[in-house]
Image: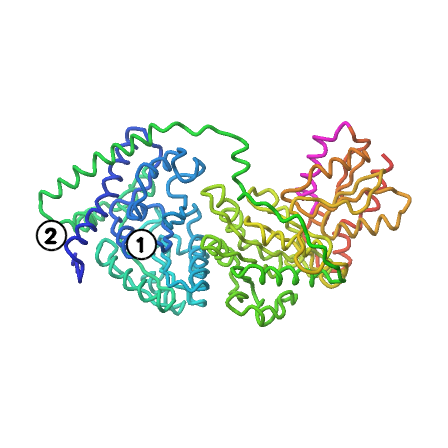
Amino acid sequence: MNFDRKDLSHDTLLNFYKAIVWPRLIEEKMLVLLRQGRIGKWFSGIGQEAIAVGSTLAMQPDEFILPMHRNLGVFTTRNIPLFNLMAQWQGKAAGFTKGRDRSFHFGTQHYKIVGMISHLGPQMAVATGIALADVLAGRKKATLVFTGEGATSEGDFHEAINVAAVWNLPVIFLIENNGYALSTTTAEQYKCENLIDKAKGYGIEGRQIDGNNLLEVYHTINEIATEIRENPRPVLIECMTFRRRGHEEASGVKYVPPHLFEIWKAKDPVTCFEQFLLDEKILQPSWVSYTFNEFVPKIEAEIEKALNEPAIIPDIQTELDDMYMPHKPVVENSDNASIPKRYMDAVSDAMRLSMRKYPNLVLMGQDIADYGGVFKITDGFMNEFGKARVRNTPLCESAIIGAGLGLSINGYKSVIEMQFADFVSVGFNQIVNNLAKSHYRWGQNADVVIRMPAGAGTGAGPFHSQSNEAWFTKTPGLKVVYPSTPADAKGLLMSAIDDPNPVIYFEHKYLYRTLTDEVPEGDYYVEIGKAKTVREGTDVTIITYGLGVHWALEYANKYPDISIDLIDLRSLQPWDKETAMASVKKTGRALILHEDTLTCGFGAEISATLTEHCFNYLDAPIMRCAGLDTAIPMDAGLEKQFLANSRLEEVMERLLRY
């Protein structure tokens, strides 16, 4: 192995040596503890330390790094105390996730590290959002994100690199090619000769380097990071290395040909670098044992201290409270005059005012800039706020949602438009596993609003007409709102943007141009989680939201002799149980109306709650009126048959007759 020190001093090289020995000795101790049964799981990076240590040494301390399972050297080189790391691995309070996640599944703003989730690929998109925030803020910074050769098969790999390339973002995408994704070999993982060949397809630079050569890794990353700080662009690096232990220790290595261990043992990054320093007379033989004798007692002491920490005492309220970042909503509005606005114009008004209020707010979506969006919600926005903040995106929902989280990590807000709510399915993982869980896992909020043009009534068929709110209402960490009026569309969107938590904002596209109503001028907020009593009555309660509110009003106007208490939930997560229960206790009868399918639609949760808490007040069974349990058809007659309002009179008649 050829080490080129270039202009590095003796002292610097000795510090590099200590930096690479430290994680190796910790790893060896962890394997002992594993055999002793004192820890339960370990992902070993033995033999790969040069990549984590060398690249981290090359990055500036305030630049973000997004590591993987086997990158202990990132954490130790960033000088995270071993006590805290061990507490994290053992699920103790002194760790970074309060016992809620394991190993390196955590982040820390203090050390500028963003940990992975088990799905591997999504963190690459998060890196693009972090880098975008730096570019927008005029900060000359680089971002480093790790991935394995296995994760290059995931769509997130393609999406993230493509976005970074199109937007010229200063991201170093580093592939640790260690030969195996658990037991799957590279021959079963990709067809190209080298993963670095993929760089050409994205129109970016790519380099393949010896991942076991500490100095080659350091110099390469240092050179690239220095360049892209001044001239932002992404670069793809493939570090060739070998996984000398199992995927995790329990999986073993029987599937690996034995001769590979001998080949790569000779390329051990610690011993090879140590021998180079000895040969160059930079390191004295006696210093080797001195370093080990210095480090080992520290490791023992820090680990024992963490192991002796008391277990976390579970507390239900703490767990519930930590799902969301604390937020005091705006509940007071100025006494502004109201003027008639269409539903779609109210949505636009909320975003325009929020863009003026928050200079760090970025809009992202397909065709939203010059074109103004397919529904023209952002028409004219680019002229006022510029393309940097009103960003056309490639067709890659997962990467853009991940970028939204990255923006939040680095001090920005974002509103992401799904062209149609149906398309969110290809970004689902980022929402339910990254956005929703980040605050609970490591205290990082996701200041992201996802706009969801949803619903039927336009004959758009199964892929443009779904009401998919129930996909998200069961996911803790998300807030879900669904306004039915122009005023609420404005007020809930401004509240969603103000809220530092992730909000899924449904807007019914049938109402865009068909509904006009009075909307307050200027800043206007509707508190998330508060229902509205649209009209008061004593015979029956209808609980609904979105387009269902207008179906219910049509029914009420048609049957004025029936005294209806009409509740518009407005928010589905959290939802206003108190208002709904108070109404049902008053009327004794409840009908739950929504556009989504009947089975497992959100109405099922409302019904269960009312049955549990209002049973003694009921004069009839709670009834639901919802869409058919089919996909949404295109034909006008079939669509009408699908929608709940075609059965509303029948269901209400049964309820009142009971």
> Considering only vertical position in the picture, is 360 above or below 247?
below
- From the viewer's perspective, is 20 left or right of 247? left
| Residue type of the residue flagged with mark 1 | Asn
Q: Assign the N terminus to one quadrant of the image.
A: bottom left
The numbered mark, 1 or 2, whose residue comes first in the sequence reads 1
In magenta segment, residue 610: yes
Q: Provide the secondary structure element on which disc 2 rests.
A: loop
Q: Which residues are magenta?
A: 597-616
CA–CA distance between discs 1 and 2? Answer: 31 Å
- Indicate left or right for 120 with 598 as reference: left
Q: Residue at x 62, y 52 (%)?
A: 495
Q: Position of residue 444 (x, y in %)?
A: 47, 46
Q: Quadrant of the C terminus?
A: top right
Q: Secondary structure at mark 1?
A: strand
Q: Is residue 83 magenta?
A: no
> Crowdedness of circle 2 by 10 Å Cα count: few (<14), some, many (20+)?
some
The residue that mark 1 highlights is: 177
Spot the residue most to the front: 335
Whole-percent x and y of residue 78? 31, 48
Q: Nearer the viewer, residue 309 or 253?
A: 309
Q: Are marks 1 and 2 in contact (CB under 8 Å)?
A: no
**Residue sitting nearer the eye, 493 or 127:** 493
Residue tagged 2 = 282
Q: Amino acid at mark 2?
A: Ile
